[in-house]
Image (spheres, grey):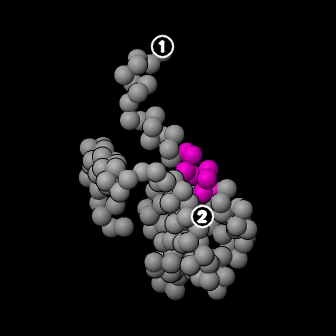
Amino acid sequence: MPLTPHLENSLGPYIGKASRVLEKRINRNLMRAGYDMTLHHWIIMVHLWKKDGQNQKKLCEYAGRNKTMITRIIDGLEKENYVLRVPDKQDRRNKLIYLTHKGKSMQEELGELMEGTLAEATEGVSAEDLATCKQVLHQVFLNLADEEILEEFAEN
């Protein structure tokens, strides 16, 4: 059944397309800059730059990804020597994820790369339009988020 014109022109497809193209551009810019990582890797790095030594469960909550996906992301970061897993002294079944020296040293350069990519994404968009866009997307989030999701995001 074809979508009605109203649904085809709704907010959903615009959010989806913008999200996909932004992720692709970020991934391409990371690769061109010589980093063997993706947006998903970068998201984990950001949370570790904020607070090093987090467990996988906390990183799952921050990134909004399941344990399997986070395990793969951490495996990739560990392979590139950006992070390492260390057994938790309180519970040896639990592994804490720490940045390596290499992972710590990338923060400024990767921050600049992301700022450049986001500037590229918003080129030609006025500050007022950008503020309105953020307000609209925030309201969409509030309209759709249940209490559990709101609590997760409040912690982050």
Instruction: Between residue 53 and residue 142, name the one nearer to us.
Output: 142
Q: Does dot 1 land on a helix, a strand or a loop?
A: loop
Q: Which residue is mark 2?
A: 41
Instruction: Between residue 151 and residue 20, name the one nearer to us.
Output: 20
- Residue 56: percent from left, percent from top: 52, 68
Q: Does dot 2 land on a helix, a strand or a loop?
A: helix
Asked if one can make out residue 148 in the rendered structure from this viewpoint, the answer is: no
**Cβ–Cβ under 8 Å for marks 1 and 2:** no
Does the magenta portion include 17? no
Residue type at tag 1: Met
Q: Give the magenta range.
A: 20-27
Query: In the rendered structure, which disc, 1 or 2, sits on the residue that comes first in sequence?
Result: 1
In the picture, residue 20 is in which quadrant?
Answer: top right
In the image, what residue occupies the spot 55% across and 64% down?
A: 116
Residue type at tag 2: His
Q: Which residue is mark 1?
A: 1
**Quarter of the C terminus within the rendering:** bottom left
Distance between mark 1 and mark 2 Cα atoms: 38 Å
In the picture, residue 40 is in which quadrant?
Answer: bottom right
Q: Is residue 82 left or right of residue 10?
A: right
